[in-house]
Amino acid sequence: MSGVESASSTISVKHRDAVAHDANTLSGVHPVLRQVYLNRGITQEIQLDRTLKNLPDYRSLSGIDKAVELIKDAMQSSKKILIVADFDADGATSCAVAIRGLRMLGADNVDFVVPDRFKFGYGLTPEIVDVALELKPDLIITVDNGISSVDGVAYATESGCKVVVTDHHLPPKHLPKADAIVNPQLLGDEFPSKSLAGVGVVFYVLLALRASLNEEGAFKKMPAPNLANLLDIVALGTVADVVPMDEINRKLVHQGLLRIQTKKCIPGISALLNIAKREPERVVSSDLGFAIGPRLNAAGRLDDMSLGIQCLLTDDEEEARHIAEQLDMLNIERRSIENDMKQDAYKILTSLKPNKNQYEQWGVCLFDQHWHQGVIGILASRIKEKLNRPVIAFAKADNGDVKGSARSIPGLHIRDTLDDVASLHPGLLKKFGGHAMAAGMSIAEKDLETFIAAFNQAVKKRLNNQVPDNILLVDGEIPDNELNLTLANTLRQAGPWGQNFPEPVFVGRFKVKNARILAQKHVKLELEIPSLNRKIDAIYFNVDNPDSIIGLSQVSVVYQLDVNTYMGRSSVQLMVKHIEEAD
């Protein structure tokens, strides 16, 4: 392997491996869905339970008792509680859940700040502590950040503030000296899921706080608040942060989706759904991830996430509609910026064609001095999907630094890879943090070439000198007579689908009756199911070379079975993931 070109390796289709089972396993489930579940390790009905009955006990989260005592003391003494949020969708939803939940439980002095990513960067930095101190807080609670904020926590406590850190990111070697830390990723923590999003962690803190207040008799004269009313926001943050959709997250997301589908969600989510042209009663997790999350994230990427948080905090429908319109405009601007950056990136990749002096491209690093800091994460994700390589996109920052946003591929833990670089080259990385599939970092621009070489070698070592296969995993073939609306609806509602519990993908052979290009990058197909002499619609979005599909007569298609609803009528449709000429 040499150069970047080899990264766009041929896609191979492979059937998922199912777990061992007996003939009676999940016997009441549709055969196609049963195979999908088995392919994801589901062998018992209890694993499909999406109620809240069997959620893990909050007491298994280390540090939660201390956190509750500090919050309770602040509430009962009418002390000022300040939430310090992150500037992405998980941070915004975590902040909204914290403020709404604390107010539901009786707190009357709660406010928030969220860092401007362009001025302060990520986390509880000393600079954002200065901003926080202007609001005279007695207790700072971080949400979706703080686990790496050693200096900021120290500065806040030295300034007379108590600090509770709630986070879900991987902890560094040296923890901040906060008054309490709640993070399921902490060494020795016994909480059964390491996959909670930041919003899930703060939701659990609220559950513990309610239980403690209840034990003290706080709700003798009134019912204890129903914190499940916050689950629409929890679901949004969990899906948008692309954390693994394990059993616990599936419960939280499913219950949140039920609130949205029955139109019991907050005005902000209703307004965002409306502007994204999504019908609440038909909403599934992918709508949160691809329609709502990006609009909420646009505030933090281009402007100020306070706007997104306010959208989630308001109970006024008209205000929510107005903010949703602003977020939609920001998202349109973000898409335009992203498209320009993507074209720049393709030009850079073309210039990196291999030659005898070109080192092998195991990890791809891209930088342009004009790129937008708030969009490099999306850019890295897009290029990673195209190349099947871990990608870091860099943009200029202040003081001669560049900031990078990394996205990884299955089998390569990107945060640990950066830790490898930091261990071998002390001081090269000024700051870094993240998790398996995504990370952020800051380095001096003058050190960029040194970092690129070091990162490349670290990735090569982590991959054991093996070129990563570009594999599309499929759940098998759907019998021709099952390619119908009933099965499409069954699969749609069988999730929630997400990271590590992916939406079902199938493979099949079809005749092409018609194909046309839409907007120069999408392909609309009319396919025929040979054995039934029946036609079925298919759509393939964002095709690199749409002309290559026009003219094919027999095709093998990797697809998701979906429901297309237009003017009140529903029909079955294939969402194409990959297409090639059939033998």
Image (tube, rainbow, N blue to C red):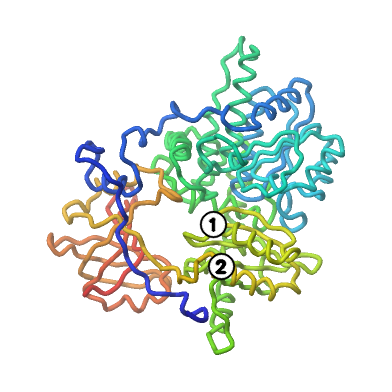
- Residue lying at 77% horizontally and 54% vertically, measured from the top left: 120
Q: Is residue 13 above or below residue 291?
A: below
- Residue lying at 59% horizontally and 88% vertically, measured from the top left: 357
Specify whether residue 333 is in view. no
SS assignment at label 1: loop
Amino acid tagged 2: Val
Q: Is residue 150 above or below residue 380?
A: above
Q: Which residue is nearer to you in this view: 62 or 531?
A: 62
Label 2 neighbour load within 10 Å: few <14, some 14-19, many 20+: many
In the displayed structure image, the side of residue 109 where residue 338 appears, left or right: left
**Number of disc labels:** 2
Amino acid tagged 1: Met
Which of the marked residues, 1 or 2, is nearer the chain's N terminus?
A: 1
Residue 437 circle label: 1
In the displayed structure image, the side of residue 400 where residue 340 appears, left or right: left
Q: Residue furthest right?
A: 159
Which residue is labeled 2 in the image? 459
In front: label 1 or label 2:
2
Q: Residue 16: x, y in percent?
A: 32, 56
Location of residue 69 (image quadrant): top right
Location of residue 575 (image quadrant): bottom left
State if disc 2 and disc 1 touch (CB < 8 Å).
no
- In what quadrant of the picture does the C terminus appear? bottom left
Q: Residue 122: x, y in percent?
A: 71, 52
Label 1 neighbour load within 10 Å: few <14, some 14-19, many 20+: some
- Residue lying at 73% horizontally and 66% vertically, measured from the top left: 428
Specify whether residue 69 is in view. yes
Q: Residue 476: x, y in percent?
A: 26, 56
Location of residue 66 (image quadrant): top right
SS assignment at label 2: helix
